[in-house]
């Protein structure tokens, strides 16, 4: 098979497109013929640069923490999948051989693309029990992006913040991938009132196009004043943030109303942010950090995307042979949309 292999830490050209032995599924595993794998700012790009060495990636190694594709081969003991099934996989999974119905695995675990070979390849083998079925009307490119961002956004808004219909939610970094998905879950699935924020008028307008009821350009508008005007002085019920921008987040924090909730799964712009503790206790605010997702939410997320309630933003689809270019694009462009690698392209 062909794979994009991280030879050592460094600039994008340390990713080498080369021949590798075809992986063989062990007992309890399946092999996926990859049709899509997303490029991620931290788990791929920062790892490649050597800025995430604590994660334990050991070059030479195949990155790619998610994938979507077709079941190509089945290991011994696998009964829930058949060749030709459309599937996706990502996240932390067992590293040892495990039966597909194993309930009490206590062995080592790790992320695909971090602790076990990842999705930047023609084929990848994963335990059957972590694989997710895809609706047939959802493209592989969309499915890979849904797998990466939608379950995290869903977990934050639905399970952690418990955002309710008609409540107000303020989406920070709303033009980014987690932000754009958050807008759509909040409005199209939950039925909340959505205020989006972005660092330019053009990006704010993109948020309106995604379904935000209001969009604030915090580079030219007073974020707190605008939110309080929109909500009639009440403030928002939920603040959804994955950036931790030290200049903007303190203003947004003051926009949280009584019994409000702040939820986050990221701190790319921080991590150190000053907040007003008087406002914290006076408004009885709850702050919850929660990375990751709940497995049980995945089918709901895939179906919401297949039904058109969530439309993921894809900026570029490139052949796997251009993985180095994809990394360079991500480093030079912080614009809206995901970069997807497709090994089936020429």
Image: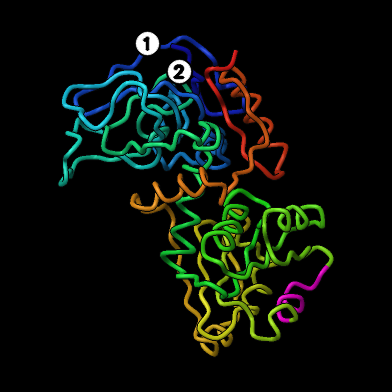
Please give left or right for residue 296 compared with residue 4 in the image.
left
The 10 Å Cα crowd at callout 1, few under 14, some 14 to 19, many 20 or more, is few
Q: Which residue is mark 2?
A: 122
Q: CA distance from mark 1 to mark 2?
A: 11 Å
x then y, percent, for residue 140: 51, 31
Residue 220 forms part of the magenta stretch:
no
Q: Which quadrant, please, contains the C terminus? A: top right
Q: Are there few (<14), some (14-19), or many (20+) residues within 10 Å of tag 2?
A: many
Q: Position of residue 280 (x, y in %)?
A: 54, 83
Left or right: residue 11 compared with residue 48: right
Q: Main secondary structure of the magenta part?
A: helix
| Disc 1, SS | loop
Quadrant of res 231:
bottom right
Residue range corresponding to the magenta coloring: 221-228
**Residue at image coords 35%, 24%:** 71
Please say which color scheme the image uses: rainbow
Residue 341 in the image: above or below residue 283: above
Q: Nearer the viewer, residue 93 or 308?
A: 308
Quadrant that contains the N terminus:
top left
Q: Dot 1 corresponds to which residue?
A: 21
Splitting the image into 4 quarters, where does residue 95 fall?
Answer: top left
Residue under the image location 46 percent in, 39 percent down:
53
Which element carries disc 2, helix, strand or loop? Answer: loop
Sequence-first tag of 1 and 2: 1
At x 65%, y 57%, the residue is 173
Q: In percent of the image, x 67 and y 30: which residue is there?
A: 328
Q: Which mark is residue 90?
A: none
Count of labels shown? 2
Look at the image and say whether residue 223 sits in the magenta stretch. Answer: yes
């Amino acid at each position: 098979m062909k794979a994009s292999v991280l030879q050592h830490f460094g600039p994008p050209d340390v990713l080498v497109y080369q021949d590798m032995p075809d992986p063989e599924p062990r007992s309890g595993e399946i092999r996926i013929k990859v049709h899509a794998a997303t490029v991620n700012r931290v788990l791929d790009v920062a790892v490649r640069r050597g800025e995430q060495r604590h994660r334990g990636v050991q070059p030479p190694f195949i990155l790619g923490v998610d994938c979507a594709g077709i079941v190509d081969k089945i290991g011994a003991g696998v009964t829930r999948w058949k060749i030709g099934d459309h599937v996706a996989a990502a996240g932390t999974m067992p590293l040892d051989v495990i039966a597909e119905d194993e309930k009490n695995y206590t062995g080592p675990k790790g992320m695909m693309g971090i602790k076990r070979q990842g999705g930047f390849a023609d084929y990848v083998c994963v335990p059957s029990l972590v694989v997710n079925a895809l609706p047939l009307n959802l493209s592989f490119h969309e499915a890979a992006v849904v797998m990466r961002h939608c379950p995290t956004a869903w977990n934050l808004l639905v399970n952690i913040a418990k955002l309710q219909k008609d409540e107000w939610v303020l989406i920070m970094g709303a033009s980014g991938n987690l932000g754009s998905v958050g807008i759509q879950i909040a409005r199209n699935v939950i039925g909340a009132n959505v205020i989006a924020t972005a660092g330019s008028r053009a990006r704010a307008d993109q948020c309106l196009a995604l379904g935000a009821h209001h969009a604030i350009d915090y580079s030219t508008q007073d974020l707190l004043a605008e939110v309080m005007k929109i909500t009639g002085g009440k403030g928002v019920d939920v603040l959804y943030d994955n950036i931790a921008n030290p200049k903007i987040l303190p203003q947004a924090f003051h926009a949280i109303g009584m019994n409000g909730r702040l939820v986050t799964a990221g701190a790319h712009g921080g991590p150190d942010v000053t907040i007003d503790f008087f406002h914290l206790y006076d408004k009885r605010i709850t702050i919850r950090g929660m990375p990751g997702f709940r497995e049980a939410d995945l089918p709901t997320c895939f179906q919401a995307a297949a039904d058109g309630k969530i439309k993921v933003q894809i900026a570029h689809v490139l052949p796997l042979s251009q993985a180095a270019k994809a990394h360079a694009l991500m480093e030079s462009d912080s614009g809206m949309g995901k970069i997807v690698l497709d090994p089936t392209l020429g």
